[in-house]
């Protein structure tokens, strides 16, 4: 078990160091999310009464499509010069490789989302940093990154990776995106635990299933 988590930590540390050097993933996520928020804000020109209706959807549209952009780069380093084969030939278990990559994707997405929240608050006149909203964001992003990492590996060797990833990936994560939008709406409206708990429980079940099945499924995906 110590070896397993050491491997996970090593893969995560490698991705963090590379991202710290080039900042490509977080920059692309932030740029696309910011552009989406600004375009939607000026396109809809929401009134105060409309903001409460459309703001949660706008926020997760930006997070979803920018997250896909980040996931497209999840295995970009390993794809260069076929380095993924070298990684797979190491004694590291497939599950450890998957978890290390998934945690990296999760961390990059969470950092970008936290940076974007104040900008979202200014554009849509919302109070973003609410405890229940933070829980919803973390749970939804965890499920998103868990499934997305597996499908990013699956689409890695295809010629049209940028097209194949969203086509394969989005239908699977629709339930958690819906739960995130509804949970975010309730959090913005000041809903308590009793109102939001069923959506958080849905995301928790999705996350557990996604992490377990994707970790074991990564072995078959990596071999292909």
Image (spheres, grey):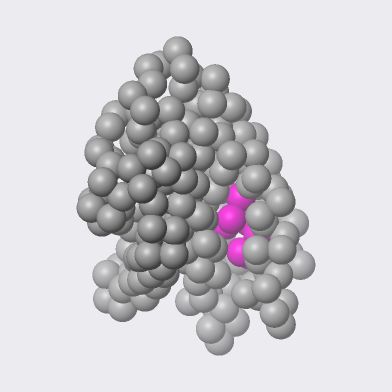
Horizontal arrangement in the rendering, residue 71 relative to residue 6 (left or right): right
Task: Name the quadrant containing residue 177.
Answer: top right
Q: Give the residue drawn at x 66%, y 55%.
A: 170
Nearest the camera: 133 or 53? Answer: 53
Nearest the camera: 29 or 92? Answer: 29
Q: Give the residue drawn at x 71%, y 51%.
A: 171
Q: Give the residue drawn at x 58%, y 73%.
A: 84
Can the viewer see residue 145 in this picture?
A: yes
Nearest the camera: 208 or 138? Answer: 138
Can the viewer see residue 6 in this picture?
A: no
How many numbered marks have been drawn onto this rendered protein structure? 0
Question: In which quadrant will I find the C terminus?
Answer: bottom right
> Residue 98, relative to residue 190: is it above or below?
below
> Residue 144, relative to residue 155: is it above or below?
above
Q: Give the residue drawn at x 38%, y 65%.
A: 42
Q: Tell me the chief SS of the magenta region.
A: helix
Horizontal arrangement in the rendering, residue 92 relative to residue 41 (left or right): right
Task: Name the quadrant containing residue 209.
Answer: top right
Range of magenta residues: 147-153
For residue 148: magenta?
yes
Image location (x, y in percent) of residue 155: 68, 69
Horizontal arrangement in the rendering, residue 154 relative to residue 111 (left or right): right
Horizontal arrangement in the rendering, residue 146 relative to residue 52 (left or right): right
For residue 185: magenta?
no
Image location (x, y in percent) of residue 187: 38, 29
Image location (x, y in percent) of residue 118: 23, 51
Image location (x, y in percent) of residue 14: 37, 65
> Residue 76, relative to residue 46: is it above or below?
below
């Amino acid at each position: 078990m110590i070896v397993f988590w050491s491997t996970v930590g090593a893969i995560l540390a490698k991705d963090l160091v590379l991202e710290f050097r080039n900042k490509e993933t977080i920059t692309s996520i932030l740029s696309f999310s910011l552009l989406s928020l600004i375009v939607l804000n000026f396109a809809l020109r929401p009134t105060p009464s409309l903001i409460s209706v459309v703001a949660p959807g706008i926020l997760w549209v930006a997070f979803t499509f920018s997250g896909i952009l980040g996931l497209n780069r999840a295995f970009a380093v390993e794809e260069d010069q076929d380095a993924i084969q070298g990684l797979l030939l190491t004694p590291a278990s497939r599950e450890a490789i998957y978890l290390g990559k998934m945690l990296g994707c999760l961390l990059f997405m969470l950092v970008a989302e936290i940076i974007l929240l104040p900008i979202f608050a200014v554009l849509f006149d919302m109070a973003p940093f609410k405890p229940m909203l933070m829980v919803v964001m973390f749970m939804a992003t965890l499920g998103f990154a868990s499934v997305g990492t597996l499908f990013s590996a699956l689409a890695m060797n295809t010629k049209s990776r940028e097209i194949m990833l969203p086509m394969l990936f989005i239908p699977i994560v629709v339930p958690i995106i819906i739960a995130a939008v509804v949970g975010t709406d309730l959090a913005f409206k000041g809903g308590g635990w009793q109102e939001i708990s069923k959506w958080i429980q849905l995301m928790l079940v999705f996350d557990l299933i996604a992490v377990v099945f994707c970790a074991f499924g990564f072995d078959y995906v990596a071999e292909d």
